[in-house]
Image (cartoon, helix red, strand yellow):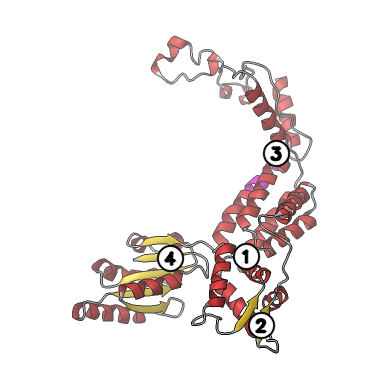
Amino acid sequence: SLIFYGPSGTGKSALAYLISTISCAKFEFINAAICGVSEVKKIIFSARQRKLEEAQRTILFIDEIHRFNKAQQDVLIGDLEQGNIILIGATTHNPYFYLVPALISRTHIFEFKPHSDAELLYILKTALNDSERGMGQGDIVSDEQALLHLCRISDGDARRALNALEIGILTTPADKNGKKYFSLEAAEECVQKKALKYDKNGDAHYDTISAFIKSMRGSDPDAALYWLAKMLCSGEDPRFIVRRIIICAAEDVGNADPHALILSNAALQAVEFVGMPEARIILAQAVIYVSCAPKSNAAYLAIEKAIKDVESEKGAEVPVHLKDASYKSAKKNDSGQGYQYAHNFSNHYVQQQYMGKKCVYYYPTEQGYEKRIKQWLIYLKKT
């Protein structure tokens, strides 16, 4: 038994039908959104009879299986164990959050990923050339850019791309010779979405993300939101965007507002859990916070300087009093001897050497919370 998990239009149902055809099993289809326990029990009863009388297996395909509650899912467990049914469940939600452990332990879970633009392009071209099940009956000339536009706005959803192509072909008038020209303009019209200049592997991609980061760094939330919107409308992966927000929170905000990094990391988790289109709201909140936060790159400059020292100089020895003293023969090597435990002193601080040489890497600024850090460090060194 299998659970297919992934976004819409990635082939979950298609693969289930294919498995049924190849296996010659009886295929039963239900949608968990509109089906109740009584219908499931009827199918299971028929599957038992079929197994006994005809020795034929039954594949029960449950679309949107995450909509079944615990009691409904429990109905399946016994017959799964006895082999009366083979379950194939499809869901757009993480099954580990929505399915009971007993069901998960009796199934194999396969995650479906969104189609790449190249895969969608292949699917669309196949549909255009298929005269039996596709749109190959007519005389159609398609613009490569038109097809690529449909791929980009479909977010990896093949069903969405095929529906858009079908609408575009049906609404495109034929010329006097009966030939249809599916152009970029027709593609934009059929999906009501303008093709943006944004190639994920080209200059426009890197220019846009550069403008996005620099807008957040420059404390301009409006500009940052505009570039965010452009990336989202162009089909950019939200996870790629949120990774850049996290980097900006650490590099450009830093300890001037430590909450920026916490909120950005929370945004990553929320984006992965919620998904698009609602993830745009989470991204917007994180972008606004990071843009409006006080800025400091002191942490970035500090680690860069430390790395430069490590790479350009001979590695420093760990001072004897800081060496590990937990093993039996540590005392013979004087490891840990003379170490002063900071919590035994006033303010939980004691002056002692933590490097073999005196170096300063971190220079806190006067910005935001970092000003308090600076004041605290000055105070400690006076004690």
Residue type, mark 2 in image:
Lys
SS for callout 1: loop
Gap in Å between the C-alphas at discs 2 and 1? 37 Å
Q: Which mark is residue 180?
A: 2
Looking at the rendering, the stretch of residues picked out in magenta corresponds to 256-262
Q: Which of disc 3 and disc 2 is earlier in sequence?
A: 2
Gap in Å between the C-alphas at discs 1 and 4? 23 Å
State left or right for residue 117 relative to residue 297: left
Q: Which of disc 3 and disc 1 is earlier in sequence?
A: 3
Per the image, the residue denoted by label 4 is 4
Q: Which of disc 4 and disc 2 is earlier in sequence?
A: 4
x and y, in percent, of residue 203 in the image: 73, 53
Residue type, mark 3 in image:
Asn
Q: Nearer the viewer, mark 2 or mark 1?
A: 2
Reply yes or no: does residue 259 show up in magenta: yes
x and y, in percent, of residue 380 in the image: 69, 24
For label 1, the crowd category at 10 Å Cα-Cα, with few meaning under 14, some 14 to 19 and many 20 or more, is few
Q: Which of disc 1 and disc 2 is earlier in sequence?
A: 2
Q: Which mark is residue 278?
A: 1
Per the image, the residue denoted by label 3 is 255
Q: Residue furthest left?
A: 53
Q: Evaluate if marks 4 and 3 touch, with contact meaning CB atoms under 8 Å apart.
A: no
- Please report the residue visible at 73 percent of the width from the left and 56 percent of the height from the top: 204
> Which quadrant holds residue 156?
bottom right
